[in-house]
Image (cartoon, helix red, strand yellow):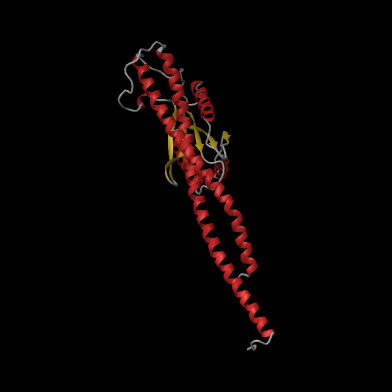
């Protein structure tokens, strides 16, 4: 049985950890809300760009990619994971799904360049024997900025248009709700106009004075950037949600332990005081020692 000093030491240790858990919980919840709000705004802007693209296509007899592309048998796979831990099996889940995707691409006869976002995911990928050609870091206490997505999109488009890549894929954990996520693979490049969302036009037919091909090229470029950003935001939302749920559980456990240890400490202290009173009474001759 633990002594009073041991119980008190455990109690003080847990109490010192509790403020850290509260701070981590607050950061995770705040980042989750920011990611979801930005994702909502990005989806709205994406829908508006799709409307613009439809208008441009009406004025183009044949649409094409922003620049000519020579086919090759090489592609890139971007694994979007986590920068740090405290999010359960988030990292191992996405790396395991990436291994399956890699096997499918290899079986299709494609050479694959593996790119990784997130230090924690990079370590897990290396532990599983995956060789990477590019590695990047994710923000620790905030959601990824749009510039990160724009830089990745520019890198991918440059290599795609130069004939170095056949396609650019990404795999990430998609946010499904509180603490829930699932791996999802998407094709970010090339952009396929045939996959535009169906729906009624949001605007009346406008007068297009800009060169339709130039308008098409610019809108496609922005849609590719938004596709990258949607992946980063959805992954961030899933990660922060998983982290929040895990830390919330740890916070509840710490509160339960504090209550149990406090009760144990007071009970042990009362027993010690009672024992001291008995010893004083015996030494004073007030009661006889049995």
Nearer to the camera, 89 or 167: 89
Q: Position of residue 208 (x, y in %)?
A: 37, 12
Judge from the rendering whether residue 74 lies leftward or rightward of residue 194; answer left or right.
right
Task: Residue 195: name its quadrant.
Answer: top left
Determine whether 106 is above or below 196 in the image: below
Location of the N terminus (image quadrant): bottom right
Determine whether 279 is above or below 255 in the image: below
Judge from the rendering whether residue 100 lies leftward or rightward of residue 139; answer left or right.
left
Determine whether 156 is above or below 262 in the image: above
Residue 241 visible in the snapshot: yes
Q: Residue furthest left?
A: 200
Nearer to the camera, 6 or 152: 6
Question: Number of labelled discs?
Answer: 0
Nearer to the camera, 48 or 263: 263
- Point 44% across, 14% down: residue: 214
- Point 48% across, 26% down: residue: 225
Q: Position of residue 7 (x, y in %)?
A: 61, 66
Task: Residue 48: name its quadrant.
Answer: top left
Nearer to the camera, 204 or 100: 204
Judge from the rendering whether residue 172 lies leftward or rightward of residue 282; answer left or right.
left
Task: Residue 36: name its quadrant.
Answer: top left
- Point 61% across, 71% down: residue: 269
Q: Position of residue 258 (x, y in %)?
A: 55, 61
Location of the C terminus (image quadrant): bottom right
Q: Position of residue 250 (x, y in %)?
A: 52, 54
Residue 164 visible in the snapshot: no
């Amino acid at each position: 049985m633990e002594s009073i000093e041991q119980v008190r030491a455990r109690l003080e240790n847990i109490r010192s950890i509790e403020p850290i858990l509260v701070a981590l919980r607050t950061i995770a919840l705040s980042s989750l809300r920011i990611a979801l709000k930005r994702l909502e705004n990005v989806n709205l802007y994406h829908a508006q760009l799709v409307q613009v693209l439809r208008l441009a296509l009406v004025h183009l007899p044949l649409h094409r990619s922003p620049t000519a592309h020579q086919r090759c048998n090489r592609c890139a796979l971007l694994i979007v994971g986590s920068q740090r831990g405290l999010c359960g099996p988030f990292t191992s889940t996405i790396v395991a799904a990436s291994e399956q995707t890699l096997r499918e691409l290899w079986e299709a006869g494609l050479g694959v360049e593996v790119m990784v976002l997130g230090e924690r995911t990079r370590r897990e990928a290396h532990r599983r024997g995956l060789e990477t050609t590019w590695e990047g870091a994710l923000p620790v206490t905030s959601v990824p900025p749009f510039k990160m997505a724009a830089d990745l999109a520019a890198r991918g488009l440059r290599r795609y248009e130069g004939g170095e890549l056949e396609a650019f894929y990404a795999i990430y954990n998609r946010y499904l709700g509180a603490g829930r996520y699932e791996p999802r693979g998407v094709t970010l490049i090339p952009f396929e106009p045939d996959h535009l969302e169906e729906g009624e036009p949001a605007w009346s037919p406008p007068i297009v004075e800009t060169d339709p091909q130039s308008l098409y090229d610019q809108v496609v470029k922005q849609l590719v950037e938004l596709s990258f950003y949607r992946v980063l935001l959805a992954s961030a939302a899933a990660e922060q949600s998983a982290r929040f749920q895990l830390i919330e559980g740890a916070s509840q456990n710490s509160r339960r332990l504090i209550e149990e240890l406090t009760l144990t400490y007071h009970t042990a202290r009362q027993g010690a005081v009672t024992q001291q009173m008995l010893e004083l009474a015996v030494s004073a001759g007030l009661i006889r020692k049995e």
